[in-house]
Image (tube, grey):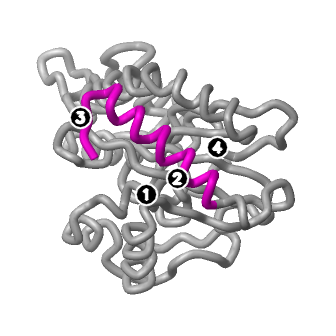
Amino acid sequence: MSDVPAADATARLLRHLARTGPLPAAALATALELPRSTTYHLLTVLAQHGFVVHLREERRYGLGVSAFELGSAYTRQAPLARAARPVLARLVDQVGQSAHLAVLHGREVLYVLEERAPRRPPLVTDVGVRLPAHLTASGRAILARLPAAQIRALFPGRDVFVDRTGAGPRTPGELRALLQHVRATGWATEDGDITAGFASVASAVTDHTGHPIAGLAVTFARGDVPEARWRALAEACARAAAELTRRVGGTD
C-alpha cells in the first residue's frame, strides 16, 4: 500500500479513466475498490483543477483539459529527447561515464533520457524517475538560470526542502548561495546528495529566449574519477549542452 493513499487513489483514478473513457462515479468506485464518498471527493478536487470533467447529461466523468496539457507536455519533451540522443551518445563515448537529460517539473526533475556507459554501475536516473531538483546537478543547472522570483516561489521556506543523504541545501538562503556558485562557475555539481559515493556535473540547455528547458549531466562513481578531472568532465558536459541548445534552436 502507498504511504500516501490519497495520491495513490488519484493516480489510479486518472489512469483508469485514460484506459476506459468516461465512467459514472459509482463505476469508478467499484473498479478501484474505493469508498463512494472518497471517489466523489477526489473527482470534485480533480474537476476543480481541470483534470476531470463532469459530463452531466451522461452522468459520467472523463479526463479534462489539464490532463490533456500534461500529455501535451510529454509530447513536447519527446523531440527534445530525440535531439539529445546523439549528443549524449557522443558525450558518453568521449568521457566514458553515463549521461542523462532531465527537465524541471515543479521542485523536481524528471529524467527523459539516459545514455549508460559500458561497465559502469547502475544509477537511479532511469527514464521517468523524478528527483528533488535542488539535490541534483541537472536541477541546479536549470534552477541557476531561472529568475529569482521563480526560485522564491518554488522554494519559499525550509519545509519544502527534501533530504536524501544528509547533504545539499536545506534553506532558501543556502540554495541561493549554491545557485550563485553555479552561475559563477558555469556548471553545476552534486557530490553524494542523491546517492552516496556518486557525483554529477551538469549544464543547462536553453531555448531561443535563453530560458532553461533541460539539464544535461554526467554521473560517475567518485572512486572512478579523481576530483582533479571533474573540471574536464564539466567542460565536456557544457559543450554537449551548448550543442543541444543549438540543435533545438536555443541560445546561450
Q: Earlier in the sequence, mark 4 or mark 1?
A: 4
Distance from Cα at disc 3 to Cα at disc 2 = 31 Å
Outermost residue, left direction? Answer: 57
- Which residue is found at the position 24% from the left and 48% from the top? 211
Q: Main secondary structure of the magenta part?
A: helix
Does residue 138 appear to the left or right of 196 in the view shown?
left
The three-letter amino acid code for the residue at tag 4 is: Thr
What SS does tag 2 mark? Answer: strand
Residue identifier under label 1: 141
Residue identifier under label 3: 66
- Which residue is found at the position 31% from the left and 30% from the top? 73
Local crowd at mark 3 within 10 Å, few (<14), some, or many (≥20)?
some
What SS does tag 4 mark? Answer: loop
The three-letter amino acid code for the residue at tag 3 is: Ser
What SS does tag 3 mark? Answer: helix
Tell me if residue 204 comes above or below residue 149 in the rendering: above
Q: Nearer the viewer, mark 3 or mark 4?
A: 4
Tell me if residue 199 comes above or below residue 90 in the rendering: below
What SS does tag 1 mark? Answer: helix
The three-letter amino acid code for the residue at tag 2 is: Ala
- Which residue is found at the position 51% from the left and 59% from the top? 132
* 37 vs 194, nearest the viewer: 194
Residue identifier under label 4: 125
Q: Earlier in the sequence, mark 3 or mark 2?
A: 3
Residue identifier under label 2: 202
Read off the magenta span: 231-252
> Which quadrant of the view contains residue 178?
bottom left
Distance from Cα at disc 2 to Cα at disc 1 = 6 Å
